[in-house]
Image (cartoon, rainbow, N blue to C red):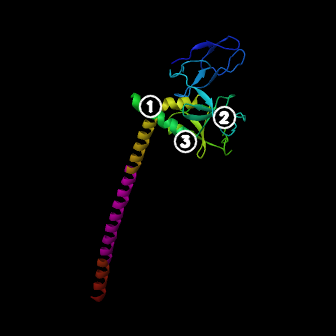
Amino acid sequence: MQAETLNCPMCGAAAATDDPTCNYCGARLATVACASCFGMMFRGSKHCPRCGAPAGQRADADLPSLQCPRCVIEMHSLLLGATVIRECERCLGLWVDVPAFEKICADREQQAAVLGAASPAPTKPVRGVGKVRYLPCPECEQLMNRINFARCSGVVVDVCKGHGTWFDREELSSIVEFIRGGGLEAARSKEKAALEEERRHLESLSRREHSGSLMGIAETDDERRAGIASAGSLLKHLLG
């Protein structure tokens, strides 16, 4: 679904529903409000322009203060449906802790199965990001690892294994779209095939080594018999 065109509530200028700010007056227009796809919605929209889901109620969650790893300003805690996330109002990035992200993945994959949409998703190239910057975890402040989600989604996210995942603007909604298209199932099938190929390769190497060992034993026995025969002939010659 394409973005709609609405008017900025501050200056009246035309703006798309997925624009974060007004291009004329700079007023904040969009926010993460769709509890279904985590896409951006224009304030006041009744339906998500990305997936068409009704705009859910968004309430502040009472959580400890955390700073955005990019902007170094305090993030707002939000409750979208049953999922608690943190949002930076400046860069529109999202911080999602480990249990919440696991729930998002499980719920969206289940939705894909129920809707019959779990067809293999195409592998996307990793998007260019220019100069790579490693970000600190908002909770432990250790530098996070940059990971291509599911190894084939093309969405590179910043992950702290013990605390959560940082998503730049629209990355979480891209991952949700990837999951709903059957991306996780396709990734698991690909990994399973790779493991099976590796198993067959190791078995082939093992058979070759075993065959080589048997040939070595046979050659050693033949050499031993030849040596004994040669020694016997020499002894017979000396005694004769």
- Residue type at the position of mark 1: Gln
- Residue type at the position of mark 3: Pro
User: What whole-number distance in Å separates the C-alpha atoms at marks 3 and 2?
Assistant: 30 Å
Q: Which of marks 3 and 2 is in front?
A: 3
- Determine the residue positioned at 68% across, 34% down: 75
User: What whole-number distance in Å separates the C-alpha atoms at marks 2 and 1?
Assistant: 36 Å
The answer to whether residue 209 is visible is: yes
- Residue type at the position of mark 2: Lys
Q: Residue 209 has which mark?
A: none
Q: Which of marks 3 and 2 is nearer the N terminus?
A: 3
Most foreground residue, 225 or 135: 135
Residues at circles 3 and 1 in contact by the CB criterion of under 8 Å: no
For disc 3, the marked residue is 99
For disc 1, the marked residue is 111
Helix, strand or loop at label 1? It is helix
Q: Residue 131 has which mark?
A: 2
